[in-house]
Image (cartoon, helix red, strand yellow):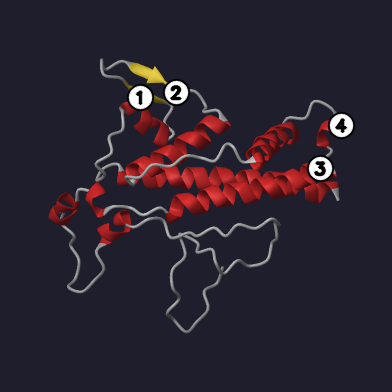
Amino acid sequence: SQSLCRTLVRNFAAHVEGFVYMMKQVTLALSTVSRAKFGKKDLACLAEAKSYSDENGEEQKLGFPEFHENFRFAFKSYASVNGFAFELDHKDKRYKDFREVIKLRHRLMHPKSLEGFHVSDQEVLQVLLARAWFEEQASRLLAAPTSPSQFQTKFMQDQPLNKKPGAPNPHDALLRPHPAQYASSPALDTAPRPDIVCPMSEPQTDSHPRQI
């Protein structure tokens, strides 16, 4: 139905935006211990601040970032803070589908006529192709090796941990790539994905199921 088609478009766009936000937050946290250097404007963009103070101490306002500009910035910053080069595959034909799907999402969110609510079969196909392209880019980014020398590990070791002997080092999380793994798929299904690990999930060790 048209309702499901519109939901498909909006959910995919929200998934992409959530992933971009996660990358920016991880990059911002790692920037304090990474050898990569970020300017004040870049740090403000990572924090999604409304303004920042430039080198002269003057306040500079930041506008709402354009979707694709923010998308490229997040991928580039995440790669930089982890010490490896990464380029989005813009030559893939599905990248055009990705851009068209974002336009479609904007059209659905800000319709100018009744026709603007309609999602065609071709546009549904574009969503599926766009998702496959996006997940391939995310997989390549998250699978890239991170060099330990990229991080100021001595600084990390010097920080007071206030932890019990044998307890996990709370700083270790900053030295590991994000655990989420994305599997490429031409279809957008709603079935459980055992290959995807939720970054906020924890192993359940108690015998009683957690109430959600």
Pointer 1: what residue? 52
Sequence-wise first label, 4 or 2: 2
Sequence-wise first label, 3 or 1: 1
Sequence-wise first label, 4 or 3: 4
Give the structural element (helix, strand or loop) at label 1: strand
Report how far apart the C-alphas of labels 3 and 1 lie in the structure: 43 Å
Pointer 2: what residue? 62
Give the foreground label among 3 and 2. 3
Pointer 4: what residue? 114
Residue at 74%, 32% (x, y): give it: 107
The image quarter containing residue 185 is: bottom right
Disc 2 crowd rating (10 Å Cα; few below 14, some 14-19, many 20+) is some
Q: Amino acid at mark 4?
A: Leu
* Position in image of residue 63 (x %, y %): 49, 23
Kindly indicate whether the residue at mark 2 contacts the one at mark 3 (C-beta within 8 angstroms).
no
* Position in image of residue 177 (x %, y %): 38, 55
Residue at 84%, 27% (x, y): give it: 113
Give the foreground label among 4 and 3. 3
Kindly indicate whether the residue at mark 2 contacts the one at mark 1 (C-beta within 8 angstroms).
yes
